[in-house]
Image: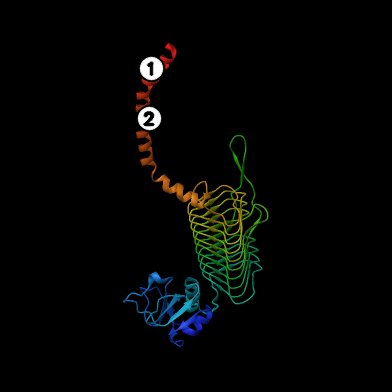
């Protein structure tokens, strides 16, 4: 069933300005090549205009100053953000509690603070607390003494270990593991490894999203803490006692070693690795596959392994591709120097002999 809004209502949501019929009814958002009548599409800048002839969208979200279009538009300061918010609104469905599936297993002393949906084969440990409108999909396992906040969605086969705290409006995608043991071992002089007990916990604050098969280890002592608004992509690994600041973004396959702290709005590109016991200041950005081995100040932009200032890394990367040609040229120059040296040697010998004779 479609959810319908007028252009005026959608523009009000994103503080945009309607140009054209404000009462035009929209029921979906779609990409330029897929949009149909009754749907709205979006462009990020003028280079995507004019719209292709085959585009059948009824309206478009555009940036300020964009070229005129033959269809109504919403002018937005940040079209990408406006499109995301409008798309979410059009897809939103009111919560409908499904209750607890007969195959779900609940431990002793579990508390439901409101209506919830607990799917097939879900297992809740003892004294688990679920807030209002929590949805837990099939096969998820929630450990004892875990607290889950209002409007949180836990997808299929997620594991949240014991004594974790999950905030409000959190999304844990399929297969994510929260609160597994941190990787801590002590090795003796013979090379035998002894496990260090991991007795801490994990705290995930409001509006955090954790991708599929991502892992957040529990602390050795204290807490591993993911602060509000952070978005974590698939296959990310977060070690014990790591603290991630507000509104940070960790892209696919990022790995962060234990006891490292990140400030606010840190962005780590895919496969970036961060060594343990470091601090990355607010708004640090690291390019994909960066290897960060030292502290980074606020606003630093780094790349490479070991990570260096991103402009230096870009120049070094460009030079790296030319190394074969540079080596070939160096060998040629060495031969030329050797040839010139051999030509100069007799002359220098004759001059020396002349000096002796005088």
Please name which of the two marks, 1 or 2, marks the residue nearer to the observer.
Answer: 1
The reply to whether callout 1 and callout 2 are in contact (CB within 8 Å) is no
Q: Residues within 10 Å of mark 1 (few under 14, many from 20)?
A: few
Residue 295 x, y percent position in the rendering: 60, 50
Above or below, comparing residue 167 to residue 287 in the picture: below
Q: Secondary structure at mark 1?
A: helix
Above or below, comparing residue 164 to residue 4 in the picture: above
Furthest residue to the left? 53
Above or below, comparing residue 328 to residue 104 in the picture: above
Between 146 and 55, the residue placed more toward the observer is: 55
Q: Which disc number belongs to residue 337?
A: 2
Residue 91 x, y percent position in the rendering: 47, 77
Between 338 and 84, the residue placed more toward the observer is: 338
- Which corner quadrant holds the N terminus? bottom left
Q: Secondary structure at mark 2?
A: helix
Judge from the rendering whether residue 343 lies leftward or rightward of residue 177; answer left or right: left
Residue 142 x, y percent position in the rendering: 59, 64
* Alpha-carbon span between mark 1 and mark 2: 20 Å
Quadrant in the rendering for residue 226: bottom right
Sequence-wise, the earlier of marks 1 and 2 is 2
Q: Residue at x 34, y 34 (%)?
A: 332
Can residue 3 be seen? no
Above or below, comparing residue 225 to residue 21 in the picture: above
- Which corner quadrant holds the C terminus? top left
Q: Which disc number belongs to residue 350?
A: 1
Furthest residue to the front? 358
């Amino acid at each position: 069933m479609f959810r319908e809004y007028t252009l005026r209502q959608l523009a009000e949501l994103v503080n945009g300005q309607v140009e054209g019929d404000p009462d035009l009814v929209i029921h979906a958002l779609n990409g330029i090549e897929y949009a149909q009548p009754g749907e709205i599409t979006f462009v990020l800048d003028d280079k995507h205009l004019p719209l292709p002839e085959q585009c059948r969208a009824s309206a478009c979200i555009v940036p300020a100053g964009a070229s005129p279009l033959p269809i109504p538009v919403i002018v937005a300061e940040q079209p990408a953000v406006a499109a995301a918010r409008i798309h979410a609104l059009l897809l939103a469905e009111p919560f409908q509690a499904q209750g607890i599936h007969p195959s779900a297993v609940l431990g002793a002393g579990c508390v439901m603070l409101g209506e919830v949906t607990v799917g097939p084969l879900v297992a809740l440990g003892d004294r688990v607390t679920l807030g209002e409108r929590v949805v837990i999909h099939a096969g998820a396992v929630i450990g004892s003494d875990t607290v889950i906040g209002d409007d949180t969605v836990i997808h299929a086969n997620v594991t949240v270990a014991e004594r974790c705290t999950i905030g409000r409006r959190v999304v844990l995608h399929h297969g994510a593991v929260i609160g597994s043991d941190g990787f801590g071992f002590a090795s003796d002089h013979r090379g035998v490894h002894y496990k260090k007990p991991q007795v801490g916990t994990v705290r995930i604050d409001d509006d955090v999203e954790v991708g599929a098969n991502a892992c957040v280890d529990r602390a050795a002592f204290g807490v591993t803490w993911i602060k509000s608004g952070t978005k974590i992509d698939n296959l990310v690994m977060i070690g014990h006692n790591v603290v991630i600041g507000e509104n940070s973004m960790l892209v696919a396959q990022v790995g962060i070693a234990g006891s490292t702290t990140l400030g606010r709005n840190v962005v780590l590109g895919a496969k970036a690795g961060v060594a343990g016991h470091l601090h990355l200041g607010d708004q640090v950005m690291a390019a994909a596959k960066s290897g960060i081995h030292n502290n980074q100040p606020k606003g630093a932009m780094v790349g490479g392994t070991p990570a260096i200032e991103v402009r230096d890394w870009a120049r070094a990367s460009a030079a790296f591709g030319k190394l074969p040609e540079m080596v070939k040229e160096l060998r040629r120059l060495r031969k030329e120097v050797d040839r010139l040296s051999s030509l100069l040697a007799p002359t220098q010998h004759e001059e020396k002999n002349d000096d002796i004779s005088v």
